[in-house]
């Protein structure tokens, strides 16, 4: 019996050795996969928040500068385009869809920037309390987007590293079928680093 | 094994991160240490004001657990206002972990910029619009006439009165649920492993325990619990498998007894106590683990 126990112990030690080198990373990968999804949801959430502010902003500006039709319409259109492109966490593997989302949001950033630059020329608009509040909310939302993106970038970098490193890449590939996820590129970051000029 | 440990991986990840990011901005102004609720690196506030404000902020914190801090720097050193402010707020970790009820008032003298950085938990009360109003109506007019002490004091008081109503009763951090969660995972890993192991025991006496232990090891979370779960299953299956072949009926009785003793001896071990900020009385002042998501407002004078 003691011989049997000794064999068992030896066997279990061997087994754990094998399993540690191959099974390692299973839970870490699962956890990081969830983390990246959560971080992405936050990015979407903040972009949505920005989109939600726009109708009010456009209406307020209209009250003072209704004749600036072109700029106002371009914002409305850019918003419609941006809200049409939704990426669910499952689609993060799709680089093309991810780029499309990026472009749509950047288009909206540009249109918003022009609208706010235009507001500079209307002192009455600038003094409007409602406009000021919207402006500060918009600025806050841009900052939140920056933070959400930064956190997403960090999580995805961590996740992608585990998907590529040995031995966790084996777990990712054969056991979990996880692929690398799309991340914001430096070019995107430069575009975002210059948010629409919000001047007070 | 070492390589797969969480610590080793983090270090490795850190190095790779550094190697991959040669383009990190060079500014990275040091975040001043949080010596008290009011950190006046630029030395523009009279000591009496610093003393007075610190007292008010500590009192507010003792009453509501909201952590409000003031930082005055001579210059941002070229770094964008929001970047620096967010970096300071998340480095100091103002507010409680989970409640995220911290606020930072940052003033950069040479840049003539002001920012209120609001923690997640207070964004609903101290909204972006309200923050902007405080900066515009309370702080900027006084700064324009050079009254820095009066401006900072008025700003801080406006912030405090805004968040006054949101009493987060100073709570002891509740024992984190992760402890029992993890225990549950280990338990289910053992159960699954034992069941599968017993099935395999029927084909071969040695195979059962090995498979059972292996399954538990893979199913359990993280290394240490996995080792324990694997070992427990291995033992259980070899014991039960043996009895199962000779004397079946005793099986259930032994299982429960063994499990109970094992878990009762391990129950205490998994809790991960969160360090919560120590503040209130005394001279010490440190953040409580609060997080900031970019809420607040900026302004200039």
Image (cartoon, coloured by chain):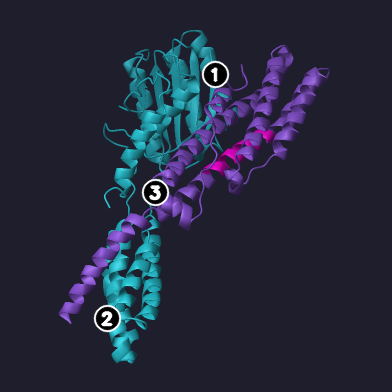
Say which chain tag 3 marks: B
Q: Chain of mark 2?
A: B
Q: For mark 3, give the secondary structure.
A: loop
- Picture quadrant of residue A143: top right
Are the residues flagged by discs 1 and 3 from a single subunit?
yes
Q: Is residue A174 above or below residue B72?
A: below
In the rendered structure, the answer to whether residue A198 lies left or right of residue A73 reads left
| Chain letter for the part of the structure drawn in cyan | B
The residue that mark 1 highlights is B299
Residue range (magenta)? A39-51
Residue B44 sits in quarter: top left
Is residue B75 left or right of A66 when viewed as pictured? Answer: left
Number of labels in the image equals 3
Q: Earlier in the sequence, mark 2 or mark 3?
A: 3
Q: Is residue B31 above or below residue B204?
A: above
**At 47% from the left edge and 31% from the top edge, which residue is drawn?**
B160
**Residue A1 lies in quadrant:** bottom left
A49 drawn magenta: yes
Q: Earlier in the sequence, mark 2 or mark 1?
A: 2
Residue in front for this viewpoint, B149 or A125: A125
A4 relative to B249 in the view: left or right = left
Examine the rendering and report whether any part of residue B99 can be seen: no
Q: How many residues crowd mark 1 within 10 Å: few (<14), some (14–19), many (20+)?
A: many
Q: Disc 1 on helix, strand or loop? A: strand
Distance between the alpha carbons at the discs numbered 2 and 3: 47 Å
User: Does B99 appear in magenta?
Assistant: no
The answer for how far apart the CA atoms under marks 1 and 3 are is: 34 Å
């Amino acid at each position: 019996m003691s011989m049997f126990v000794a064999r068992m112990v030896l066997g279990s030690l061997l087994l754990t050795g094998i399993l540690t080198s191959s099974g390692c990373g299973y839970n870490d990968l699962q956890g990081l996969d969830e983390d990246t999804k959560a971080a992405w949801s936050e990015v979407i959430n903040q972009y949505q928040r920005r989109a939600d502010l726009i109708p009010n902003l456009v209406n307020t500006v209209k009250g003072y500068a209704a004749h600036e039709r072109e700029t106002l319409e371009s914002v409305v259109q850019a918003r419609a385009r941006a809200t049409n492109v939704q990426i669910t966490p499952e689609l993060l593997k799709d680089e093309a869809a991810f780029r499309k989302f990026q472009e749509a949001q950047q288009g909206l950033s540009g249109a918003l920037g022009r609208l706010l630059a235009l507001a500079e020329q209307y002192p009455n608009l600038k003094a409007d309390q409602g406009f000021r509040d919207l402006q500060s909310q918009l600025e806050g939302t841009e900052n939140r987007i920056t933070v959400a993106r930064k956190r997403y970038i960090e999580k995805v970098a961590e996740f992608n590293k585990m998907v590529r490193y040995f031995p966790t890449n084996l777990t990712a590939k054969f056991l979990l079928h996880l692929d690398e996820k799309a991340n914001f590129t430096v070019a995107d970051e430069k575009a975002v680093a210059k948010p629409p000029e919000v001047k007070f | 094994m070492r390589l797969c440990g969480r610590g080793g991986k983090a270090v490795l990840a850190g190095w790779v991160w550094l190697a991959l990011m040669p383009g990190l901005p060079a500014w990275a102004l040091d975040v001043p240490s949080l010596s008290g609720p009011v950190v006046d690196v630029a030395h523009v506030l009279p000591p009496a004001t610093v003393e007075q404000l610190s007292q008010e902020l500590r009192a507010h914190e003792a009453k509501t657990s909201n952590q409000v801090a003031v930082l005055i720097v001579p210059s941002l050193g070229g770094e964008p206002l929001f970047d620096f402010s967010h970096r300071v707020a998340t480095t100091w970790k103002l507010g409680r972990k989970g409640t995220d009820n911290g606020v930072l008032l940052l003033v950069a003298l040479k840049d003539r910029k002001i920012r209120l950085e609001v923690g997640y938990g207070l964004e609903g009360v101290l909204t972006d619009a309200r923050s902007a109003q405080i900066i515009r109506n309370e702080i900027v007019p006084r700064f324009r006439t050079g009254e820095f002490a009066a401006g900072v004091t008025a700003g801080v008081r406006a912030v405090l009165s805004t968040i006054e109503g949101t009493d987060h009763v100073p709570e002891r951090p509740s024992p984190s649920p992760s402890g029992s969660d993890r225990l549950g995972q280990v338990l289910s890993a053992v159960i699954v492993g034992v069941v599968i192991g017993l099935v395999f025991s029927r084909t071969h006496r040695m195979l059962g325990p090995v498979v059972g232990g292996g399954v538990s090891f893979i199913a359990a979370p993280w290394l240490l619990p996995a080792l324990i779960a694997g070992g427990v299953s291995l033992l259980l299956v070899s014991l039960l498998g043996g009895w199962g072949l000779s004397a079946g009926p005793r099986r259930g009785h032994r299982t429960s007894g063994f499990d109970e003793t094992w878990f009762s001896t391990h129950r205490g071990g998994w809790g991960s106590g969160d360090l919560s900020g120590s503040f209130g009385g005394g001279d010490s002042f440190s953040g409580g683990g609060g997080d900031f998501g970019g809420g607040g407002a900026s302004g200039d004078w």
